[in-house]
Amino acid sequence: MKGMLALGLVLMPMVAMNAMASSDPVIGKPGEAAKAARTIAVDMSDFMLFTPSEIKVTRGETVLFVLTNRGQQPHEFVLGTARDLRDHAAMMQKNPGMVHEDPGQVTVEPGQKKELAWTFTNSGVVAFACLYPGHYESGMRGTVTVK
Ligand SMILES: [Cu+2]
C-alpha cells in the first residue's frame, strides 16, 4: 500500500508534463485581443495556401490574427513547432475526424472570419498549418519568425 502511494507521487509529475506537451510553451501563449499591438490578416484558400505565409513579429509581441476563409471548404490555422505540425498532419491522415480544441488553433468555415490573439514569447520560428487531411501535404503552411 505504501509502495503504491509512492509510485503515484512519482508518476503524477510525468502525467502533468505529458498534458502540456500538446501546446508547447516554446511557441508562445494565448494573448489578449485587447492588448494586441497589431492585426495581421491571413487569408486561407482552397488552393491550400495561406496569404501571407511568412510573417515576422517581435519577441513578446501580442498579435491578433484575423483569419478569413476565402474557399468553399473549411480550413484551420494551427500554431505549433514545425515538428509537432508534421507529426500531427501524419496523424490526421489516419484519423481524419479528429477535432482540435487546443489553444493556438481555430477552424474557419467557408466565407467566415475568425480571430486568434497570440503572444510570441520566444525568439525563433513558430510554424502554422492547416491540418485537414491532405492540406498540410499540399503546402498549406507557413512560418512566424520571432525576433
Ligand atoms: Cu486547409
Image (cartoon, rainbow, N blue to C red):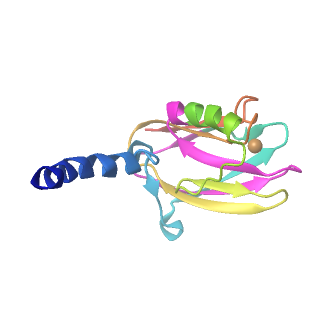
Q: Closer to the camera, 105 or 143?
A: 105
Residue 101: x and y, percent? Answer: 58, 57
Query: Considering the image in quadrants, where does the C terminus appear?
Result: top left
Residue under the point 79% across and 53% down: 69
Q: Going by the image, does 51 lie left or right of 24?
A: right
Q: In this view, which residue lies farthest toward the bottom?
A: 34
| Residue 16 drawn in magenta | no
Q: Give the vertical position of 108 relative to 132 (above or below).
A: below
Residue under the point 58% across and 31% down: 86
Residue 82: x and y, percent? Answer: 53, 32
Query: Considering the image in quadrants, where does the N terminus appear?
Result: bottom left
Tell me which corner region of the image, top left, top right, bottom left or bottom right, holds residue 133.
top right
Residue 132: x and y, percent? Answer: 72, 42
What range of the chain is rendered magenta?
Answer: 55-84
Residue under the point 85% across and 59% down: 111
Q: Going by the image, does 38 lie left or right of 28?
A: right
Quadrant position of ligand 1: top right
Residue 106: x and y, percent? Answer: 64, 56
Q: In this view, which residue lies farthest toward the front?
A: 1
Report whether residue 77 is seen: yes
Q: Going by the image, does 9 lie left or right of 145?
A: left
